[in-house]
Amino acid sequence: MDKSGNAVLLIDDEPQIRRFLRAGYEFAGFSVREAASAAEGLKSATLTPPELIILDLGLPDLSGAEVLERIRSWSNAPIIVLSIEAREQEKVRLLKLGADDYVVKPFGIAELLARSDAALRRYFEGSMKAAIVKAGALTVDLALGVVTLSGRRIRLTRKEYRLLQILSTHLGLVVTHQQLLKEIWRDHQMHNIQYLRILVRKLREKIEENPNDPRILINESGVGYRLEPGSEESLSTTGKTKAKSETSV
Amino acid sequence: MRLIRSRETAVTTSGGKFASAMGNMHALWIRPKDLGRLIFNFPRSRPVVAAEPDQGFRFASYLRISAWQIIQALALVGLTTIVYFAIDHLGLLNFVPVVYMIPVVIAATRWGLLPAIVASIAGFLASDYFFSPPYYSFVMEDPQEIVDLLLFLGVALVTSDLAARLKDEADNLRAREKELADLYAFSRRLAACFTVPELILAIEEYLSITLGRPAVVIAGAASGGTGPVDHQSLPEPIRQQAVAMIATGALSSRTIVEPATQRVWLITSISTDYVDHGAIVVDLGLGPSDAIDARRRHVEVVLAEAITRLKRLDLAKAMNDANLRVQADQFKEALVGGVSHDLRTPIASILGFMSVLAKFPEIRDDDRIHPLVEAAQTEAKQLDNVIQNLLNATRITQQGIHPQREWVDPADIVNAAIKQRSHRLAGHRLTVDIGRDLPLAKVHSTMIEQAFGQLLENAAKYSQTGSTIKVSARAEQDRVVLSVCDEGAGLSPEEAQQLFKRAFRSPRHAASVPGSGLGLWIANTFVTANGGTLEVASRGAGLGTTASIWLADVCSETSELPAIVHG
């Protein structure tokens, strides 16, 4: 993916955080713009719309949620939220308001760049609906409805496939429990999260090498699930850089 | 232990009114009455238990006083005779001796028995000499006169005795009244003492004034000696003895005799049940043993009163101290909360910068530098964990915890906790055993993750690098057990008892392994709030530890769910 043209707008009131974000994004080939307040950020985003927005929630002049809503009212550009508090409900609310993903401080730049990649991919390819999605050894052919693991075809139930399909279209991005429940069971089982847990467990048994140590279908505590693009994917986009530091245990 | 002149310390504590009076206080022992008026507003009368002068001097003065009173009594008799002479020609009185009852009664009520007896005899003689024929002679002719005069003498003597007794009673009553008033004033004064030094000063002053002699408090260990050592008011041998006796600690009350002067000194401890305030040394002076005893009793009454007040002050002080501790705790909480927030942003920056650094090929590919960057990252993460713990502890104390529980796969909890603490577990062999088809647990997942992460962290912290840490999740009856088993330091029975106390650190590790003692307390709080139980077991020190989280609220009918899931 060519990112040389992509502009990222960093909205954060902490100069030191902006500084390392700038270094990281510039290293990854982005052109970087900074804003130290919500007002400045909104102005900058309106004047020259960026391809990606990194939004800190602890801004002094406006709540993160409000900034998010205002940008979303006219723009579909990916927004990744930075938060200090690891409060699940807050994260879910922000995702519902239109944030594409979040990272919790303190975080490594590799994690944020991976989220950025995923968000940009979805932003640019969303209209084209990429037919084939790869996550580690897993390949999902969305057009044919065929799932293969290391080249071998695996059989999934309808609900398992639906779950994998939703996660695949959000490859690398978190999808909330509510969103999954709603899309898999329609409105019938909205609050029965245990069904989702069991479904995930069943799916993991089929797609994960070790279902008890999942590397593809990742749990985001209290928020949702994420289909991890895996190391092969990250090698193809940002090189080896992401490798050791964040993704693997 | 030091001799103190606590009145000097009290000057600084008890404010202006006192301080101005203290301006010329160096002569305290010399002018006790002045001080008494100044502080207690005592009347100017002589003290209750009068300062008794030396014996020889006292006898002489007694003689002098008695002689003077006798002369006064005789003068009264003389005066009566002259007055009677003046009015005798009016022939108003037939029975002359009755007139002499006047000086007798006056002498008895004013000066006591001896002058009254002298007045009676003088009256008898004067009556005989001047007014019974033959006049100007002691000879009596009329037997009736003789009987009358003897009768007069008898009545006068009895009256003298009665009146003198009455006088003594009245004197005693007045003295007791005065004593009570003084004690009352003393307790009022005590009630106005709000610190121990003030109180000790009051005792010293009161005893010095009422006895007219030095009373010196020797500070005990608790009071902490203040001010210069008062060498002036205590003779050296007494001071030495007193200090030696206080040092033994078992001192109650006893008297010692100063060898050089034979003066008796009383040493009494003024300690309460709670605090040892030292002892007071009082000069009881010289005199017969009953006088010494009376003075001693007086001192003891005063001290009993003072010690009651002292107990209350000790209690008040203890309560005040406790109050201060609570305030200090609140301050600490606020400080921890504020500081933690301020620390987290720079740490987030540091970790960010490190992660950017680690991406540069120059560093990434350099085998010498890359491990350093990774190590720095690990340490910064560790620091962040510590601050997170402080924040959690503050939050728990200030706001309590409000878990939002939902169904969670225990495997996800275990994996998330392992991922969170991966930097800590890197040096150990980790085996993970997660049972098949575990029931879901209804918990606030991040809380249990953090609690389990703390167990992992402790296992890594208190066991050798390279040793094995076994992690398991299994179903047991109606519960799910998440456990961490290490081969490390283990727990002594005493440590096991105190493990969940806030800020507990075992003395075994306090110096060698860093920590705040908050981790396990937070873990326990989180687990309990989620309806679970945290158990830490060890076969003993050095024999490894097994820490388990038991989650009770589980959904065991997961086997029935697939119907809906697949349907």
Image (cartoon, coloured by chain):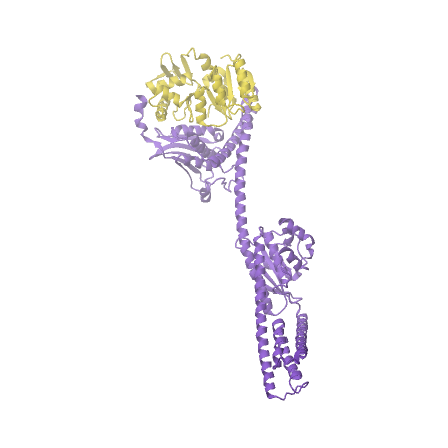
Q: Nearer the viewer, residue B438 or A83?
A: A83
User: What residue is at 40 percent from the left and 16 percent from the top?
Assistant: A139
- Residue A189 vertical position relative to residue B57 in the rendered view, above or below: above
User: What residue is at 55 percent from the left and 59 percent from the top?
Assistant: B304
As drawn, the chain in purple is B
- Residue B365 vertical position relative to residue B335 in the rendered view, above or below: above
- Residue B241 visible? The answer is no
- Residue B361 vertical position relative to residue B195 in the rendered view, above or below: above
Numbered disc total: 0
- Residue B463 vertical position relative to residue B235 in the rendered view, above or below: above
- Quarter of the rendering occupied by the N terminus of chain B: bottom right
Q: Which of B509 and B147 is in front in this view?
A: B147
Residue B210 position, x and y percent, is 62, 61
Residue B33 position, x and y percent, is 66, 60
- Residue B399 visible? The answer is yes
Residue B123 position, x and y percent, is 64, 79
Residue A68 position, x and y percent, is 48, 20
Taking B430 as reference, is B251 left or right? right
